[in-house]
Image (cartoon, rainbow, N blue to C red):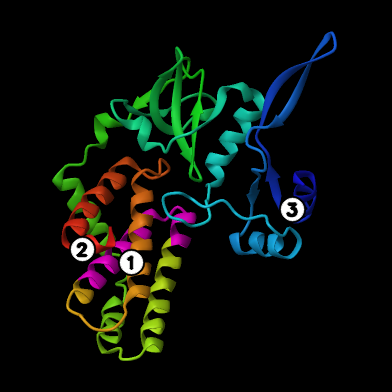
Amino acid sequence: MLERVLHILEQKFNVFVHKTIKYKRIKKHVVKESVPTISGLVFVQGDISEIQSVLDERCLGVYLVKDRATGLPAQIRDKSMQAFIRMSQISPFRIRIMPHPIGYYSAGHPMVKITSGILNGVEGYQVRISRDKCLITTMGGLTIALGGVSKESFENIEEYASIDPERYRELRQCSELINPVPFSEISVNISQASTPHSIKTASSDLDRWVQKAEFYIADSAYEKAFHILKELLHEMGATLRKIVKNDLSEIYAVCIRASKMLKAMTIDLEIEAGLRNGIKEEMKILAERYPAFF
């Protein structure tokens, strides 16, 4: 099954399967073999909609993996993937897929950035597992332990990542310089909506902005994505708490999706540490004002 899916995907996309070396005894000999680390897991480079279209047409029952934080197809930026592939090729035994979300390993462990070797620029939590110094990081919703990093050079992110009020104001001002988002017009439409169709139309308008934020995240334009999601949640929160009639479940669903995307950004180690902390501070404000979204 895996070979067939790989053959189909390779015709149009770049694909990669992470493999683990295992040894097994056959009669009197020990044989080394390379097997997929996670059965059925294939990394594919390409447009999400194009990949899903090929799967729907030619690989029934095969789906894109969802990111646990957002519920959306998991995405990995090319820079991170290339580092992962290089390590897989040079030292495959140093990579382990971990069973818990990255937050499970963060408590009590410093956040660092590797500044040397093939993993230069990769961020994560420095954790010791079975006497092995590891870097716990995340890729596309997967939590990964990179072992044997004791010889690498590190930069302690937490020494400068704690955001102060001045830095936070700077981030807010930066996001406010981006073109204003017309959520006030959508708010008026929701307030005046009298039919399920008009509510669905407003929901679709909001969803297009969430999709735009997804595009910005995929393109590493994190501050633009943050601005869209933040403004959407503030505007919709202020609007929805004034409305007591109509079924607004579709609007709430889009807002909850936006809040999950913000949450995912707070643990995305591709994002600059100061911005991650700025997003965390904004989420505290949003959760206090509009708990229904969280």
Q: Which residue is mark 2?
A: 290
> For the residue marked with disc 2, what is the amino acid?
Tyr
Percent x, y of residue 1: 77, 47
Asked if marks 3 and 2 touch (Cβ < 8 Å), the reply is: no
Asked if marks 2 and 1 touch (Cβ < 8 Å), the reply is: yes
Which comes sooner in the sequence, label 1 or label 3?
A: 3
- Characterize the local packing of mark 2: few (<14), some (14-19) or many (20 or more) Cα atoms within 10 angstroms: some
Q: Residue furthest front?
A: 27
**Which residues are the magenta region?**
214-237
- Mark-to-mark CA distance, 2 and 1: 10 Å
Instruction: Name the secondary structure under disc 1.
Output: helix
Instruction: Name the secondary structure under disc 2.
Output: loop
Q: Which residue is mark 1?
A: 255
Q: Main secondary structure of the magenta part?
A: helix
Asked if the magenta segment contains residue 221, the reply would be yes
Q: Which mark is residue 9?
A: 3
Asked if the magenta segment contains residue 64, the reply would be no
Which comes sooner in the sequence, label 2 or label 1?
A: 1
At 71% from the left and 30% from the top, the residue drawn is 35
Q: Please identify the quadrant where the C terminus is shown.
A: bottom left
Asked if marks 1 and 3 touch (Cβ < 8 Å), the reply is: no
At 16% from the left and 57% from the top, the residue drawn is 288
Percent x, y of residue 223: 34, 56
Instruction: Name the secondary structure under disc 3.
Output: helix
| Front residue of 28 and 140 | 28
124 on left or right of 288: right
> For the residue marked with disc 1, what is the amino acid?
Cys
Q: Quadrant of residue 54?
A: bottom right
- Characterize the local packing of mark 1: few (<14), some (14-19) or many (20 or more) Cα atoms within 10 angstroms: many
> For the residue marked with disc 3, what is the amino acid?
Leu
